[in-house]
Image: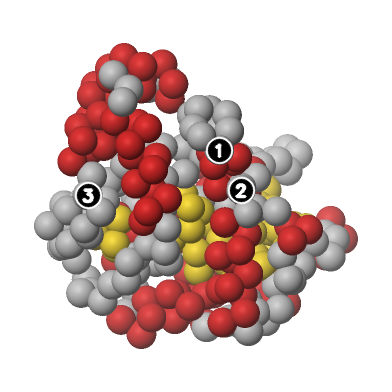
């Protein structure tokens, strides 16, 4: 079983590292292509393109200017320890053991607008470039055309090496659009997380993102290799709902306490 996650906009390059184990991204030359394109843009143009504030635009222009093909602990840190959004608060990678991080390296991938596909321990220089960005490049009008079949091919290689029978999609719709499911060697299963506060069940973005991280952590802790084992996921009150699930979409629900 192989899981895929989205990255996070929030990054942490300050907390102490919990491991020195690391690897390098597979697509550094492709990332360098994107960096070359981004370096040609002014902060104002970057702000308009990515719909971010002037402060963030200048920060990321500086990041692109500093980006190097050489990855070291001076300019990088492992992806799983660098991302720090809602998903990663649920995953809480900094409390994983060395053995758990090693297991995650074989069974988890992070989709990325700049890096294509990252393993948990791949060194990553700080950036912001969402997969849905309409960045004109020599391959087409956006990052989906830029990455083409590369993301899918990388996932197929990981699926083969880990002898996985399914891909567990814990990524957002924006990021999973970079994958071509029909070209994958295994079926895709997408867990869905819904919450209720005394009314109808629905997907609440913050809770759903956190739940994706919680499920990834659950799989890592228990070293789950068979997808059906994920149906036992019950962290923070979630329960699998067979009646609302299908072969490719698994529903997990919980009732939130009413304040």
Residue at point 47%, 44% (across, down): 113
Which SS class for mark 2?
Answer: loop
Query: Nearest the camera: 188 or 153?
Result: 153
Task: Say if mark 1 contacts mark 2, CB within 8 Å.
Answer: yes
Query: Nearest the camera: 118 or 101?
Result: 118
Rate crowding at label 3 as few (under 14), some (14 to 19) or many (20 or more) other CA atoms within 10 Å: some
Disc marking residue 148? 2
Query: Nearest the camera: 145 or 219?
Result: 145
Disc marking residue 68? 3
Alpha-carbon span between mark 3 and mark 2: 24 Å
* Comparing labels 3 and 1, the label whose residue is closer to the camera: 1
Which SS class for mark 1?
Answer: loop
Image quadrant assignment for residue 231: bottom right
* Mark 3 or mark 2, earlier in chain: 3
User: As displayed, is residue 87 above or below residue 225?
Assistant: above
User: As displayed, is residue 259 above or below residue 248?
Assistant: above
Percent position (x, y) of residue 85?
A: 39, 46
Image quadrant assignment for residue 54: top left
* Mark 3 or mark 1, earlier in chain: 3
User: As displayed, is residue 108 above or below residue 191?
Assistant: below
User: As displayed, is residue 2 above or below residue 170?
Assistant: below
Residue at image mark 1: 139
Percent position (x, y) of residue 22?
A: 28, 72
Percent position (x, y) of residue 188?
A: 73, 63
């Amino acid at each position: 079983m192989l899981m895929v996650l989205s990255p996070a906009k929030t990054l942490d390059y300050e907390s102490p590292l919990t491991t020195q184990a690391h690897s390098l991204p597979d697509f550094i030359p492709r990332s360098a292509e994107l960096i070359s394109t981004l370096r040609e843009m002014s902060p104002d143009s970057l702000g308009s393109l990515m719909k971010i504030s002037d402060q963030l635009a200048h920060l990321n222009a500086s990041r692109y200017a500093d980006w190097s093909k050489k990855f070291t602990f001076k300019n990088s840190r492992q992806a799983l320890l660098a991302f720090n959004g809602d998903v990663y608060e649920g995953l809480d990678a900094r409390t994983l053991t060395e053995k758990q991080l090693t297991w995650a390296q074989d069974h988890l991938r992070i989709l990325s607008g700049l890096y294509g596909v990252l393993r948990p321990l791949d060194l990553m220089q700080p950036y912001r470039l969402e997969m849905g960005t309409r960045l004109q490049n020599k391959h087409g009008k956006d990052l989906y055309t830029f990455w083409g079949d590369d993301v899918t091919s990388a996932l197929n290689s990981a699926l083969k090496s880990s002898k996985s029978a399914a891909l567990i999609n814990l990524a957002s719709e924006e990021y999973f659009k970079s994958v071509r499911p029909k070209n994958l060697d295994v079926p895709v299963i997408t867990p869905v997380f819904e919450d209720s506060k005394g009314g109808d069940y629905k997907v609440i973005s913050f809770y759903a993102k956190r739940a994706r991280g919680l499920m990834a952590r659950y799989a890592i802790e228990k070293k789950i290799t068979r997808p059906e084992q994920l149906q036992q996921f019950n962290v923070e009150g979630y329960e699998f709902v067979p009646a609302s699930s299908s072969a490719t979409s698994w529903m997990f629900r919980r009732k939130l306490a009413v304040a």
